Image (cartoon, rainbow, N blue to C red):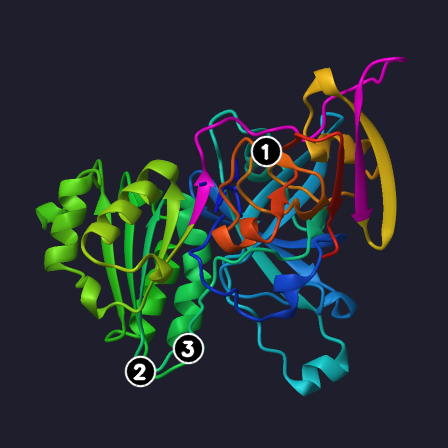
């Protein structure tokens, strides 16, 4: 997934899923932390995208245990400015045998980075990132993963656009390898064949599972033999695809990953044809906005009215005063006293800055990551939360 700018996920990695219980996994509930990892390989995928693989030392293997569909945030300094971007993990979790664990062998972690026009980080990744370079990588996060406990005879469908294929690569591989009777169908839209990321990898996966993997490539600027697979996916085309290529009644779980316009279209049409919303999981790789900066300078002047914000993080409570007139976010204020407060996209998409309001109240500007049940339990995205009470207490540890 490209940059999370990661609906009321999400780019980059990171997103929102339907209102179903999150799958159990150690990485699903861990608080995000950065560790410095070395780049092992940078592999070209297309003219404007690369796969970046990191070496994970054995002692950090547990920290980077993850579920297919999760994402990591990358942090580095470019031109004297800290830059953070979130990207989905494109490889299924590695299986480690007892012998490998005992031998202390390292594991690997891979993300795909597609160059955004004018994108600082993505351009640097294409032109300057190389093996041996060290970069801060956050431990895996996200709920864009399967809720199915049993994959036998299950049919999973993924709909992706461009770099939205990234998490679906890991999901498809996992669905097909963990059961001999499972099926995966991928509807993947790009401008042309040259823009298809993981083209060879998808072909290899099709060769391995010819009867259980179905691929439908839709190209908006390249004519294909079947008219339904040519041109941009709009409502009419999607309804045709669901009528002649993919029977919604035969699908157990849906995964949508792409721009907001495509995700919204798919959710609407799937709902219209009777697909229960709890069977649809989605994540955005961009909302169409420019990348956000988490912190902006705020100065508290003597005598001005302030809001008291208390932050619980790693068992330590910190307090900061936020000027009422500044109308700053909880995250912006928290970073003044806790620079280790977790965040990635700062755009309400990835969910990395998630915390629970213990006291007081806030209002959120955007929410592309939290589920209704999380909102009911008091969880907020601190990057989008603005206090509406004189005192607010948020807890990142809950």
* Mark toward the viewer: 2 or 3: 2
Relative side of 254 to 318, left or right: left
Question: Element type at marker 1?
Answer: strand
Residue at point 15%, 44% (across, down): 237
- Quadrant placement of the C terminus: bottom right
Could one spot residue 77 in this view of the protein? yes
| Residue 365 found in image quarter | top right
Q: Where does residue 238 sit, x and y in percent of width and height?
A: 18, 47
| Residue 158 found in image quarter | bottom left
| Residue 104 found in image quarter | bottom right
Question: Element type at marker 3?
Answer: helix
Q: Residues within 10 Å of mark 3 (few under 14, many from 20)?
A: some
Who comes first in sequence, dot 1 or dot 3?
Answer: 3
Q: Which residue is mark 1?
A: 363
Q: Residues within 10 Å of mark 1 (few under 14, many from 20)?
A: some
Separation of residues labelled 1 and 3 (CA atoms): 43 Å
Residue at point 51%, 62% (across, down): 91
Q: Which residues are magenta?
A: 283-312
Residue 150 lies in the magenta stretch = no
Q: In front here: 153 or 390? A: 390
- Vertical comparison of 220 with 43: above or below: above
């Amino acid at each position: 997934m490209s940059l999370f700018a990661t609906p009321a996920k999400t780019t980059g990695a990171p997103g929102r899923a339907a209102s179903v219980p999150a799958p159990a996994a150690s990485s699903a509930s861990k608080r995000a932390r950065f560790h410095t990892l070395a780049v092992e390989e940078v592999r070209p995928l297309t003219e404007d995208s690369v796969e970046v693989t990191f070496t994970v030392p054995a002692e950090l293997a547990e920290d980077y245990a993850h579920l297919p569909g999760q994402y990591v945030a990358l942090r580095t300094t470019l031109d004297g400015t800290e830059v953070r971007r979130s990207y989905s993990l494109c490889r299924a979790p590695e299986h480690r045998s007892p012998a490998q664990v005992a031998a202390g062998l390292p594991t690997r972690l891979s993300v795909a980075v597609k160059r955004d026009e004018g994108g600082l980080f993505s351009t640097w990744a294409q032109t300057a990132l190389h093996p041996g370079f060290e970069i801060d990588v956050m431990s895996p996060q996200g709920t864009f993963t399967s809720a199915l406990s049993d994959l036998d005879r299950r049919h999973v469908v993924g709909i992706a656009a461009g770099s939205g294929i990234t998490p679906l690569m890991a999901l498809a591989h996992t669905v097909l390898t963990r059961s001999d009777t499972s099926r995966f169908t991928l509807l993947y839209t790009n401008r042309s064949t040259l823009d298809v990321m993981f083209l060879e990898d998808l072909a290899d996966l099709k060769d391995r599972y010819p009867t259980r993997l179905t691929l439908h490539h839709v190209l908006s600027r390249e004519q294909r033999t079947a008219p339904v697979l040519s041109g941009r996916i709009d409502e009419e085309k999607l309804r045709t695809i669901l009528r002649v290529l993919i029977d919604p009644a035969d699908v157990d779980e849906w995964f949508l990953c792409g721009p907001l316009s495509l995700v919204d279209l798919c959710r609407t049409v799937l709902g219209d044809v009777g697909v229960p919303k709890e069977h649809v999981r989605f994540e955005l790789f961009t909302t169409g906005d420019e990348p956000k900066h988490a912190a902006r300078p705020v100065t508290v002047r003597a005598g001005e009215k302030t809001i008291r914000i208390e932050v619980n993080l790693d068992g330590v409570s910190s307090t900061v005063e936020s000027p009422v007139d500044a109308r700053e976010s909880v995250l912006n204020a928290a970073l003044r006293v806790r620079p280790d407060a977790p965040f990635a996209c700062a755009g309400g998409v990835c969910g990395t800055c998630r915390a629970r309001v213990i006291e007081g109240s806030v209002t959120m500007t955007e929410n592309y990551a939290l589920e209704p049940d999380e909102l009911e339990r008091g969880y907020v995205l601190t990057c989008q939360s603005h206090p509406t009470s004189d005192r607010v207490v948020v807890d990142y540890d809950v």
